Image (tube, helix red, strand yellow):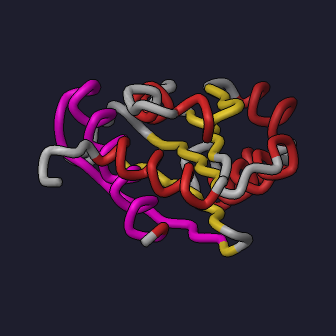
Amino acid sequence: HMNISLEQKIVDILKTKKWQISLAESCTGGQIVATLVNATGASRVLSQSYVTYSCDAKIRILEVKKDTLERYSVYSKEVAKEMVEGLQKVTKANVCISVTGEAESNEPFCKCYYGIIIDDKIYIEEVAFKGRRNEVRMKQTMHILKRVYDLLL
């Protein structure tokens, strides 16, 4: 079983549970959902996903409050939380994931905030990675998928 990809393991668990997963991605730009779609059977567990890159999209699609964006900035736990809650409202999926943060920074680390709702439990977390833009996005993607997998076990 060692060579089964993380995304295949996640999809297999979701299929067994007959659960749906949905995503609202910002800094990862759809990379998390694209990774999940690599897995056989993804169509049975994924009905919809969003790349809400702009603040406008976060407000319009996910009902993130303009006030929250202004008060805490787009890169914040508060925004990740409103994104994942809005996503669950829109999609009704059993597993909802949001991510917002930096893919590039003048600091040594790029901060990323993500929200996960699984079976109505909510997790809001922060992670930081070093590297170039696309390296950072890949690290964010794999970190979040690993976290989802661990929470599903």
Residue 27 seen by the camera: no
The residue positioned farthest toward the left in the image shown: 2
Along the line of sight, which residue is nearer the eye, 77 or 87? Answer: 87
Is 97 rendered above or below residue 148?
Answer: above
Residue 123 position by quadrant:
bottom right
Is 89 rendered above or below residue 33?
Answer: below
Q: Which residue is at a point 42% across and 72% down the rendered structure image?
A: 153
Is 134 rendered above or below residue 106?
Answer: above
Query: Total marks drawn?
Result: 0
Q: Position of residue 141 (x, y in %)?
A: 36, 41
Is 25 one of the magenta-colored residues? no
Q: Which residue is at a point 70% across and 57% down the rendered structure image?
A: 94
Along the line of sight, which residue is nearer the eye, 85 or 54? Answer: 85
Q: Which residue is at a point 65% across and 63% down the rendered structure image?
A: 117
Q: Position of residue 17 (x, y in %)?
A: 60, 60
Q: Which residue is at a point 77% across and 56% down the rendered structure image?
A: 85
Magenta-tinted stretch: 122-151
Q: Is residue 46 left or right of residue 29?
A: right
Q: Tell me the chief SS of the magenta region.
A: helix
Q: Position of residue 63 (x, y in %)?
A: 86, 42
Q: Position of residue 59 (x, y in %)?
A: 83, 35
State the quadrant of the N terminus: bottom left
Residue 16 seen by the camera: yes
Along the line of sight, which residue is nearer the eye, 3 or 59? Answer: 3
Is 70 rendered above or below residue 114?
Answer: above
